[in-house]
Amino acid sequence: METSALAQSTSDRYPQVASPLHTILVLAALGGWAFWAKILADQLSAAPNPNRVRIYLLTIFVEWLLFVVVVAGVRRSGASVLLVLGDHWHSVRQVLRDIGIAAGFWVVALMLLWMFSRLLRIAAQPRNVQFMLPHGGAEITLWMALSVTAGICEETIFRGYLQRQFMALTKNAPAGILLSAAAFGAAHAYQGFRMVILIGLFGAMFGILAYWRRSVRPGMIAHAWQDSLGGVVGSLMRH
């Protein structure tokens, strides 16, 4: 009787937000996209004039498509999308609070990433991602759109959805955070093995933030800001 009650309590604490089959399909889609992105990145990095606009637009499309697949799977299971995203903002104060949390998180995460990158001997601008940096006003504008897309979609997919699913399947929060972080790193395999490790560590930080806040909204803000600033600063440094 007590064992049954404990199992029920654990299940209530880490509820599934979609079926295991749906999660497998999402992981397969992410794996396919990561594999194809690696091939495309190798081709573009070797090209004298890579078509960055094409890769920006394609990535935006794929990420929003995966976002829709995740939300559709959650709704089909009968779970609330708020379990994935976190509660709505109900006041300007709540918005400002999450912006402040995102800013504080970003500063701390940036310092930790700098230390980890030194340990992993990763250059400030890895050669295998330099081709992605925007050139000119039009590309910078698209880069911003891509960064906002990544903030919204990737936090929803990896921290809102996969992290919760992994927690539900393992009945363990740290395991869910680590598995989601590993998937996040693997999804960026086109950037090279060391960057996969660094991005996975970054993903774990986002996972801890989402678990603590019970929302992906601060992570969305920090993620979009980091990607936007990283691309623009990296482009300026290149020139």
Image (tube, grey):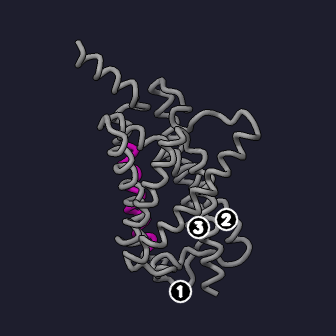
- Residue 87 screen position, x and y as percent: 60, 33
Are there few (<14), some (14-19), or many (20+) residues within 10 Å of tag 2? some
Q: Which residues are magenta?
A: 25-41
The foreground one among 14 and 144 is: 14
Which residue lies under the disc numbered 1? 48
Which residue lies under the disc numbered 3? 54
CA gap between label 2 and label 1 equals 21 Å
Residue under the image location 64 percent in, 76 percent down: 233
- Mark 1 falls on what kind of element? loop
Which residue lies under the disc numbered 2? 142
- Residue 32 screen position, x and y as percent: 38, 56
CA gap between label 3 and label 1 equals 15 Å
- Tell me which amino acid carries mark 2: Leu
Of the numbered discs 3 and 1, the one sitting upstream in the chain is 1
Q: How many marks?
A: 3
- Residue 201 screen position, x and y as percent: 41, 60
